[in-house]
């Protein structure tokens, strides 16, 4: 039976594979592809939209256009993709290259003109097809570690003409992978109060038994009603120890297919549903991503296929059944899990269920909810939650308890603080912060003020509080001192920091002229390249102004000399 499944699956796989052009796109680097991240890998609040290609722990590797075309978009930001380049090709696809150190000389000149014209480091431009044409095998950039990258690598994507990212491996890009996917956890989920697993109506972790052939089994499960399962799984490729995402998951109940998750292509507007797909509570409390092999209401991921009863099994009393899970990587290496299920209707009520006390406040998923206490009000739009929810809501002094951050949200909701009891001097320095971690460290939430009301929109539940920031940012020279000659230096570096509300903006001038300073938020360093040609005088007066998120501002001034 297992081999029949394999034959059927392979025929479907190669049919899907053939619809994408093969050998059209080249490897964007001149080194073998070794990945630190795979397509649609599970990430925080999103599916990974491309391949993370290792760059041998270095920056500055030459990045080549995957095919001819034209630069259709350039975006530079402090966070996210950092420096990113988009190339549109004659066949309708667009390739994306992100976390770059810098662009090729002519693209670098183009984007710096835009930055100096707008007097900002962060820019987004959309060149016309005739402005920056790209030839086959043209070097377009150098790999880096910009934006929210956790280490040097190249993020590479292929998108269709609807801006949907597609697994680049489908286009013939080859990565060595001879290892089976690994399973590290399995859970069972009774769907409702009429269902149970192993005498429990709540989620149950099952004991996973590795087999010598790389597959897995689970001890017999006693169950009744509508039951779902979830797994913790990952894949490891040759030449890398990273825990990467898998390519496909299928389930079979008594030989009949009941669920498939095919990580081939998705839309950016649906990627938020990852928090419905995984067990969000386990992720938030244990940092482990359990993939639920059933589709709950609101989970409209297009990667879900062939759902029978939304992936739930219907287990009847006095029956014996077999549930199988197949986890596959892109190279068709697979691991199977076999779970015998005994149908048993009777179940004893658990003591914790009898003592389960629900919070007083209740939010209907399809209705607006407004909560108020003291100087705090919370506005929750309709369809913010996937399900109706008992909400734990309380306000003590200026601290708001807004449930626990274990529930996925579809939308942002609004927190309002009435600050009329504060004096006018203090009001300008207040902001709303989320208290995170064991030590409840305040983290700035973008805050606006209208009269005596502070407002913040957030997509996380948790604990929030008013905070006051009275300390201005710090500015420290890195590679020079006041009055220093810098003729042999190629760059000017300044470090900036703010301990509480965080950096909002900065501006630097030399002899009154605006200069471009690239901000690396991971190190807090601003860098100006003298190659820009702005600094031409012998004596140069530098002025840097940095402002935090509540308006505290610092100014640094120094003189340096160059020949």
Image: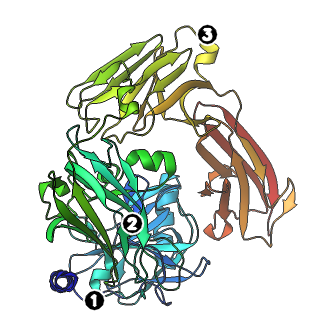
Residue 405: give x, y in percent of width and height: 45, 37
Residue 170: quarter of image: bottom left
CA–CA distance in space, label 3 to label 1: 66 Å
Q: Secondary structure at mark 2?
A: loop
Please provide percent x and percent y for residue 364: 24, 27
Residue 199's spot in the image, x, y percent? 32, 44
Q: Few, some or many C-alpha atoms within 10 Å of disc 3 (few <14, some 14-19, many ≥20)?
A: few
Q: In the image, what residue occupies the spot 74% across and 46% down?
A: 475
Label 1 Cα neighbours within 10 Å, binned few <14 / some 14-19 / many ≥20: few
Please say if 340 is above or below 369: below
| Rendered residue at 51%/65% (across/down) | 112
Vertical order, 134 against 108 (above or below): below
Circle 2 packing at 10 Å, graded few (<14), some (14-19), many (20+), is many
Where does label 1 land, which residue? 24
Mark 2 or 3, which is nearer the eye? 2
State the image quarter where residue 17 is shown: bottom left
Relative horizontal placement of residue 314, taking residue 455 as reference (left or right)? left
Of residue 124 and residue 313, the one placed in the foreground of this image is 313
Checking the image for residue 41, the label placed there is: 2
* x then y, percent, for residue 164: 25, 65
The tag on residue 447 is none
N-terminal-most mark, 2 or 1: 1
Horizontal relation, residue 185 to residue 503: left or right: left
Q: Give the residue number, with chain letter if any, for mark 3.
A: 423
Choose the circle earlier in sequence order: 3 or 1: 1
Q: Secondary structure at mark 1?
A: loop
């Amino acid at each position: 039976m297992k081999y029949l499944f394999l034959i059927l699956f392979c025929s479907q796989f190669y049919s899907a594979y053939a619809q994408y052009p093969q050998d059209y796109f080249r490897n964007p680097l001149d080194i073998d592809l070794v990945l630190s991240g795979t397509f649609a890998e599970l990430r925080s609040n999103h599916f990974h939209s491309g391949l993370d290609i290792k760059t041998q722990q270095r920056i500055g590797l030459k990045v080549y256009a995957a095919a001819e075309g034209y630069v259709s978009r350039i975006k530079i930001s402090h966070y996210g993709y950092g420096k990113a380049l988009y190339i549109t090709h004659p066949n309708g696809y667009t390739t994306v290259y992100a976390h770059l150190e810098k662009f090729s000389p002519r693209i670098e000149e183009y984007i710096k003109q835009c930055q100096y014209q707008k007097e900002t480091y962060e820019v987004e431009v959309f060149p016309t097809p005739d402005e920056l044409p790209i030839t086959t095998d043209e070097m377009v950039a150098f790999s880096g570690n910009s934006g929210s990258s956790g280490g040097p690598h190249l993020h590479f994507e292929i998108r269709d003409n609807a801006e949907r990212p597609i697994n680049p491996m489908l286009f013939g890009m080859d990565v060595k992978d001879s290892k089976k996917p690994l399973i590290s956890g399995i859970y069972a989920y009774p769907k409702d109060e009429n269902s149970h697993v192993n005498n429990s109506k709540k989620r149950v972790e099952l004991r996973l038994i590795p087999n010598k052939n790389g597959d897995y089994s689970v001890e017999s499960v006693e169950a009744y009603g509508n039951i779902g399962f979830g797994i913790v799984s990952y894949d490891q490729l040759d030449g890398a120890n990273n825990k990467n995402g898998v390519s496909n998951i299928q389930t079979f109940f008594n030989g009949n297919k009941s669920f498939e998750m095919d990580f081939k292509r998705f839309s950016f507007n649906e990627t938020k549903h990852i928090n419905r797909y995984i067990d969000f509570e386990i992720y938030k409390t244990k940092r482990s991503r359990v993939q639920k092999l059933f589709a709950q209401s609101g989970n409209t991921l297009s990667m879900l296929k062939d759902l029978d009863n939304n992936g739930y099994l219907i287990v009847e009393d006095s029956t014996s059944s077999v549930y199988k899970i197949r986890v596959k990587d892109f190279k068709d290496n697979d691991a199977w899990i076999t779970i015998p299920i005994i149908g048993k209707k009777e179940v004893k009520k658990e003591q914790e269920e009898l003592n389960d006390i629900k919070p007083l406040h209740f939010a209907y998923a399809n209705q607006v909810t407004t909560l108020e206490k003291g100087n705090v009000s919370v506005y929750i739009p309709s369809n913010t939650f996937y399900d109706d929810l008992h909400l734990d809501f309380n306000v003590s002094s200026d601290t708001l308890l807004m449930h626990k951050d274990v529930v996925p949200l579809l939308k942002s909701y609004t927190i309002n603080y009435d600050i009329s009891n504060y004096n006018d001097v203090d009001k300008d320095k207040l902001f709303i912060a989320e208290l995170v971690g064991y030590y409840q460290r305040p983290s700035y939430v973008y805050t606006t003020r209208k009269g005596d009301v502070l407002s913040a929109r957030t997509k996380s539940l948790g604990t929030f509080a008013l905070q006051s920031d009275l300390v201005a940012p710090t500015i420290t020279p890195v590679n020079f001192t006041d009055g220093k000659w810098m003729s042999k230096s190629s760059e000017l570096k300044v470090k900036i920091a703010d301990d509480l509300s965080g950096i909002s903006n900065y501006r630097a001038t030399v002899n009154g002229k605006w200069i471009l300073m690239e901000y690396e938020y991971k190190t807090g360093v601003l860098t100006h390249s003298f190659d820009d040609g702005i600094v031409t005088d012998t004596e140069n007066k530098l002025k840097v102004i940095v402002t935090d998120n509540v308006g505290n501002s610092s100014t640094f001034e120094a003189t340096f000399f160059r020949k």
